[in-house]
Amino acid sequence: MNVLKDKRSNLAINILIAIVIALTVNFSYLLSMIVAERETTDQRQRMEQDITPRHEAEGVLNLSHDGFGYLIVNQVLSDTPQEDSIYVSNRKVRWYNLQDGDTIICTFFPPRGLANPSLDEVRMQNGNEIAAPVIYDRPKRNQDTMTQMIYYFLLSWLLLTVMTFRVAKRGKYLYRCAIVLLITVACYFLAPSVSWMTGEAMMIFQHRDMINWMVILKCTVALVVAILYGRIYQLLYLQQQVLLENEHLRTENIQSRYNMLVGQINPHFFFNSLNSLSMLVRDKNEEKALEYIDQLSYTFRYILQNGQNTQTTLKEEMEFASAYGELFKVRYADKLFFDIDIDARYKDWTLPALSLQPLIGNAVKHNTITRKQPFHISIKTEGATLVVSNKKAPKLEPEPSTGIGLKNLHSRWQLITGHDIEIIDTDAEFIVRLPLQQPQN
């Protein structure tokens, strides 16, 4: 689902960028079309409002290779007493579909300065009366504009798609650049171009001169934008991949460390349980042995089901502590007691699973437990803190201690919750304060 969503997002971005490129490269053409249409409208309005008589002339049209021409007339058009000519722009040539050698009767604008008079309106062409321009066609120009917009949109979208398709390796970037360069060169010959001499839209390969610098500039802009965006897209993709890989490695590292810590707990608990069970078997106390096996089964099931979980509720942890404590009560009958005082408001708060097991085990291991000197382990809540404590009763021959249990507990709390536990070890009392985590709704 995430892959499909990424593809749709990438497609939408490529389409938007392609639209922007198409509008940008055709901006000058759109602007010139708007200006030309406005100039034509203004000119027609001036012609309708102009009540002064306009000068007429008759002559033969001589077109140049560049599309414009001069109307050669045999009359005086200016102050210079010589054969005069009227300038005919390429736009007028297209409007009236004028051909080289046409005999034309027209009106003209007076010259400005040393310039030639300019053609205003063609009245007759080769003896035929003309009422209005025959070439200028607004729907056709709009169609030409739309054709160019669609072409450059498709070209840009194709180049962007090639540059952003399955970006995976750095070495592929230059290969993609070469592909889009070849695509641009091939598509150049299919680009639509409006001949400013004839006004006809055709593809580049249909022109006699296939070098059109304006089309080359437009294709180059699309190519450069696609290459730059492809590079930016690749860098962002690689950065995202690095972040995902780092997060994956971090998760695996935390899980491995957690599994290692839990693995150090389980063997210690397992061997102690077997020792207690073997004692009951030697005493041939079948009823207590069966009860012990039931409690042992529950505690192992809890470890298997919850030992790999990051957190558990205080209620579940206390149920496990009760069953775990019963295992020791079987061994220390009427000599070991648990003082439980848990505020019900915090039963759904969370803490790392198996947090109480090493504290109970260490308390039993390092203190004297006799009928004359019974041992009490207190488990209570003080606000949002779980407090486990016991009065010290050191053995005459202290058990060797590696400190692994407390180190494991401290490390697990840092890994899972990001918080530290508080250990208070005095001559008279041993206290561990475990901050509970508020459940997330």
Image (spheres, grey):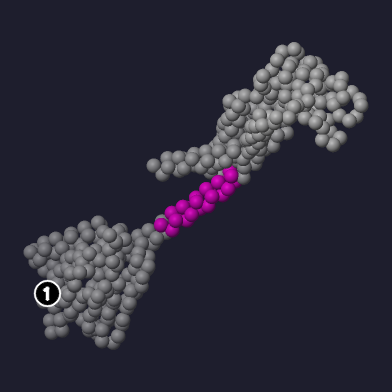
At label 1, which amino acid type do we have? Ala
Q: Does 97 lie within the magenta span?
A: no
For the point 62% across and 45% down, the residue is 228
Instruction: State the residue in front, 221 or 120.
Output: 120
Instruction: State the residue in front, 366 or 141.
Output: 141
Q: Is residue 390 left or right of residue 198?
A: left
Q: Is residue 97 left or right of residue 302?
A: right
Q: Range of the magenta residues?
A: 229-251
Q: Is residue 177 visible?
A: no
Instruction: State the residue in front, 205 or 149.
Output: 149
Where is residue 99? Give x, y as percent: 76, 17
Residue found at the far bottom of this picture: 427
For the point 43% across and 58% down, the residue is 250
Q: Secondary structure at mark 1?
A: loop
The residue where tag 1 is placed is: 333
Where is residue 101? Give x, y as percent: 80, 16
Quarter of the image holding residue 18?
Answer: top right
Q: Is residue 211 above or below residue 362?
A: above
Which quadrant is home to the C terminus? bottom left
